[in-house]
Image: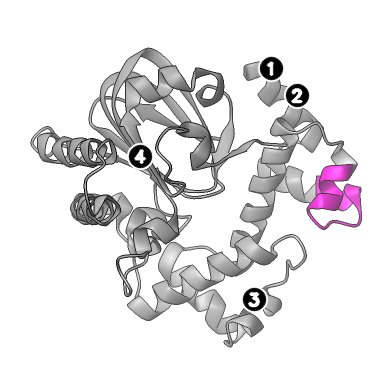
Amino acid sequence: MIPILNIEQFDKVIHSHDVYSNELSLHLKKNSHIVHTAHRHDFFLCVLFTKGIGIHEIDFNNFDIQPGTVFFLKPGQTHLWKFDSPPEGFIFFHTSDFFEFGYSNTKVAQFPFYYSNENPPNLHLKKDDLPSIKQLFKEINDEYNTDAIFKNQKLSALINLLYIDLTRLYSNFESHSNVGSTVYLSTLRKFEVLIQKKYKENKSVSFYAKELNISTKHLNRITKNTIGKSPSQIIKERLILEAKRLLVHSEDSLKEISNILGFEDYAYFSKVFKMTTNKTPSVFREKYKKQH
């Protein structure tokens, strides 16, 4: 199975289980046995590259690493780093509880880079924007390494300020902008959260529409207007993503993976997988492992 890391694994000295920060080069050196193989976290991750070139693989999609790149990862996403030159920058993690303990009306999922699975997990900063963003990352790291009074409150406030500034920059990119009404986007978010919880045992659009207290027709209208996909397509994509994770990061047999994902018939699972990826599960597994 894919290793799921928690924050305690990254820092045994400072006894805070909900937040972690470090200079990127130190973090990578300290955790070299972890970061270059595929793994996933149970927290939110944000990283700024100020130096270095390479590839960041996130859920089987490759993104370029270059100076000025920021990445955002949500709990459960699988990722690994491949560097062509030594990277520098800053990295921090936190749980949703840590971020939200000081903000009764603020949720970390409100920020667009964490809001929807359809939103890109990366942002490339313009040269003029990099210094101020880098300074906020540095302030977060400096505060993390102090024992001053109200440390957690200040860390939470600094992270919130950084996320606000990053949201303004993120939203300026046309490819990063959401389309649709606030109500539609809110329902889309609820739909994605439900899928995350129920996709293995419930694959029908009617189930999710009923849970959301709307008609299947209206759910289809919402997803088409916001992200240009049908509800069934979104459900299928989540299933296929988990299938890919299990195929390449576990030793489970193809039939076991089919069962884990709630398919009673392996032949049907294989058919669905091939229709989506143009490869059978066995070919996908073999090809990925050869390339990595």
Q: Which residue is mark 4?
A: 92
Q: Is residue 209 above or below residue 178?
A: below
**Tag 4, which secondary structure?**
strand
Q: Residue at x 22, y 39 (%)?
A: 137
Q: Residues within 10 Å of mark 2 (few under 14, many from 20)?
A: few
- What quarter of the picture does the C terminus occupy? top right
Amino acid under disc 2: Glu
Q: Residues within 10 Å of mark 4 (few under 14, many from 20)?
A: many
Residue 195 location in percent, x, y?
A: 62, 65
Nearer the N terminus, badge 2 or badge 4?
4
Q: Residue at x 62, y 53 (%)?
A: 237
Amino acid under disc 1: Lys
Cα gap from disc 2 to disc 4, whole angstroms: 34 Å
Residue 19 location in percent, x, y?
A: 39, 46
Whether pointer 1 and pointer 2 mark residues with C-beta atoms closer than 8 Å, the reply is: yes
Q: Which residue is mark 2?
A: 286
